[in-house]
Image (spheres, grey):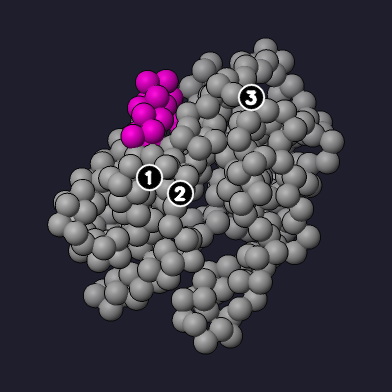
Amino acid sequence: MNKPLAGMQLEEIGKDVYACLQEDKGLGYSNSGFINRGGGLVVDTFWDLPHTRELIENYKRVQRQSIKRVVNTHSNGDHCWGNQLFEGAELIGHRRCPELMQRESPQTLQGLRNATGSPDPAIASMAKKLSEWNFEGVELTPPNTLFDERLDLNLDGLPVQLIYVGPAHTSGDVIVHLPEQRIVFAGDVLFRFCTPIGWDGTFNGWVKALDFISKLEPEVIVPGHGQMCGVEGITEMKEYLLYVLHESRYWFDRGVTIFEAAKKIDLGKYAGWNEPQRIIFNVERAYREFRDLSFDQAEEAISLFRGMYELEMQYNRNG
């Protein structure tokens, strides 16, 4: 195999199965997969067109023919905004994926990316985090083959199971399971050494999704973000979610606000995970559940990102 392109690592993780991993440098640095059978199947595209073109160049080093299928594990842009570059491919996703994709705007993010001179420090900080991305030219290209609970594929004798496990990270989460290879592409149901953000799912659903993956007994799991792992990654993630849920309940019962609770929770060993300030999103999700609100009625995202910025400044001050 030739030397990988800078910034991405292509690894063969099974016979004719590859993972394209991005160094986890924070917001948007997701992973992808490639099954080099049956015309080729890609698991997730990247957040912008330049990174997705680099992804395609990585896969060209090993692919035997034009890629026939792309699976989106969920609707977040860092897993599907590169879809348009796979022209002619069948795009597969959960039935809710097209609808949920419409909630995010490449044009809005491009505007935020360009706001480096904003007098608002939270916006300027977010612009800096987005500086390595370029959302120009992105056209939302949703899946055109949709399923509800499960879709089984046969790629030249290799069984591939697409299984709905949401609502977990989102309400449209899909995992890609290769039972003979004992490989799972988990999408954002799993983050590894990287603080997760929960969107329109539930803690209970997320834990159930993790338990479901564990019962598949995979030897290799490719997370949506972070390093590949085995089932130990599932255990770590589950422990984090249950810890945050428990701590959030404590502060919720005492009338403490979401932001204050996020500040008070001792991160312990999780302080070393990338972007620990994302905890504010998970506390907000917990509070929503304690109030019996719908899992898709999140607080306005901009207020949470402002809170995340303030938390980040606090962590930096405290070392």
Crowding around mark 3 (Cα neighbors within 10 Å: few <14, some 14 to 19, many 20+) is: some
Q: Residue at x 28, y 45 (%)?
A: 290
Residue 35 against residue 198 in the figure, above or below: above
Marks 1 and 2, how far apart in space?
A: 7 Å
Crowding around mark 2 (Cα neighbors within 10 Å: few <14, some 14 to 19, many 20+) is: few
Is 247 in the magenta?
Answer: no
Q: Which residues are magenta?
A: 204-223
Residue 221 against residue 280 in the figure, above or below: above
First along the sequence among labels 2 and 3: 3
Marks 2 and 3, how far apart in space?
A: 24 Å
- Cβ atoms under marks 1 and 2 closer than 8 Å: yes
Q: Quadrant of residue 118?
A: bottom right
The kind of residue tagged 2 is Gln
Q: Position of residue 191 (x, y in %)?
A: 42, 45
Q: Quadrant of the N terminus?
A: top right
The answer to whether residue 179 is left or right of residue 289 is right
State the residue position of label 2: 297
State the residue position of label 3: 147
Can residue 41 be seen? Answer: no
State the residue position of label 1: 293
